[in-house]
Amino acid sequence: MAEIIGSSCSRVVVGLGKTGMSCVRYLAGKKLPFKVIDTRTNPPGLDELKNEYPDVPVHTGSFEKSWLLAADEIVLSPGIAVATPEIADAAATGVKVVGDIELFCREVNKPVVAITGSNGKSTVTSLLGEMAKAAGINVAVGGNIGVPVLDLLQNDTIELFVLELSSFQLETTHSLRATVATVLNLSPDHMDRYVSMIEYHQAKQRIYKGCSKAVYFKPDALTVPLLPQATPAIGFTSGLPDLNDYGLLTDSDGIWLCKGVTRLLNCAEMKLQGRHNQTNALAALALGESVNIPLEAMLSALKEFPGLSHRCQWVAEKDGVVWVNDSKATNVGASVAAIEGLGEVISGKVVLIAGGDGKGADFSQLRSPVQRYVRELIVIGRDGEQIAKTVEGAADCSHAEGLAEAIDRALAVSQQGDTVLLAPACASFDMFSSFEQRGDQFVVLVKEKL
């Protein structure tokens, strides 16, 4: 446990909302003095702050530079880049810039599993939490998913913390010493925030710093931990594994999750669908082994875990056509994983609905899976046209004004054995308030139209 900086330290919480308010509650509970800044005029959490902590100084509508420059420590929301000029200027004078994860790491004294990656991290985090529960372990799951980590500290009976961490959160985390850490995969994302893939890779690699064990995806060199060789590491792969690693084995009885040559579970017994979810299951098994979760409990959880909403979520089936909501596929890598993961295991083709706010991404990685697995690409949203141009000739393509029109088109072209897949490869903010709203609308429309 790292030393908690004392009450003489001057702090400024920058950014309210769910995470910011968790920082407020934590610091107030410790009786540590702090101020709050939010550049929004009326940010979420402001009324709660004023009502419950009326003595806390607060500035809204802009950065208050004098507060930042006078601080010893800035507690920064993950939604605000460290490179933001006002934050960078303060950091240049020696002000420490941390986030809620750093505050958590200074205090936590129980095992921590730390999970990041471009795609699949919410599924793996939630699945591992269910595995721990099945074993009777009092587990807390949170971070970038669900409950902010500082709120998890309020329960002193927790035996294991399982955390999903974003690259944004890792940027401001310095004291993470995870029992086991993983980068599940790495593909271009948030290129509107990072200068290059190198910078994004460096942010993700921070999760391994000081970890006791590492888990990584062997086919993806960018997930390999940049650690001393003495640090134990377990690999997982979508093919046949090496002796001490996790992988997939195919025989006449189907596809098996296995460790080395030992078959663990037939994938037909899992509710999770798609090759990418099979590798997510392998990652969870490797992480669970690293914190001594019994294998029997992990396999039991795998048979029951239905997956998460908006993440390759089964919506409906009619006339031999399955409809799947993967609205959480907000980047190219996630969309590719969904297309390939489903395309490899269905008898027909994928009818793909994609498009939205591309966040400056390069869509060229979509060409190969579209060409191999997609019957027709239906594009929507601001960057739909760019996707269509990038993969031109790989599959039939049509344009729709919105989800309703896209679903009508999918109904018209899909055939028995096909899967209609919403995997946008884009953020939702050009048309929706969130990927959840986009997915919810897709689910409602599909059920209305079938």
Image (cartoon, rainbow, N blue to C red):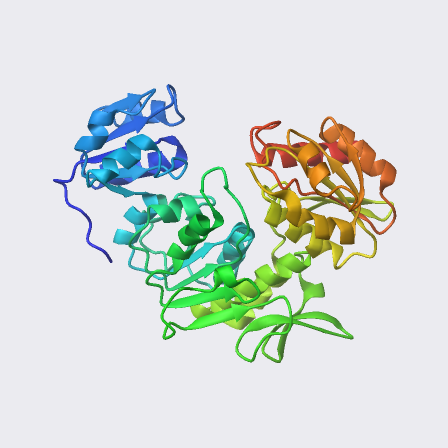
Q: Is residue 420 above or below residue 129?
A: above
Q: Is residue 266 above or below residue 96?
A: below
**Quarter occupied by the C terminus:** top right
In the rendered image, residue 332, in percent from the top left (x then y), is placed at 61, 45
Task: In this rendered view, identify the residue nearer to me: 82 or 256.
Answer: 82
Task: In this rendered view, identify the residue nearer to me: 134 or 379.
Answer: 379
The residue drawn where x is 64% and y is 32% is 383
Q: Is residue 280 above or below residue 296?
A: above
In the rendered image, residue 250, in percent from the top left (x then y), is placed at 72, 72
Task: In this rendered view, identify the residue nearer to me: 337 or 320.
Answer: 337
Is 45 positioned to the left or the right of 270 in the image?
left
In the rendered image, residue 251, in percent from the top left (x then y), is placed at 74, 75
**Quarter occupied by the N terminus:** bottom left
Q: Is residue 163 something that shows in the picture?
A: no
The residue drawn where x is 33% and y is 46% is 172
Is 50 positioned to the left or the right of 164 in the image?
left
Q: Is residue 175 something that shows in the picture?
A: yes
The residue drawn where x is 61% and y is 70% is 247
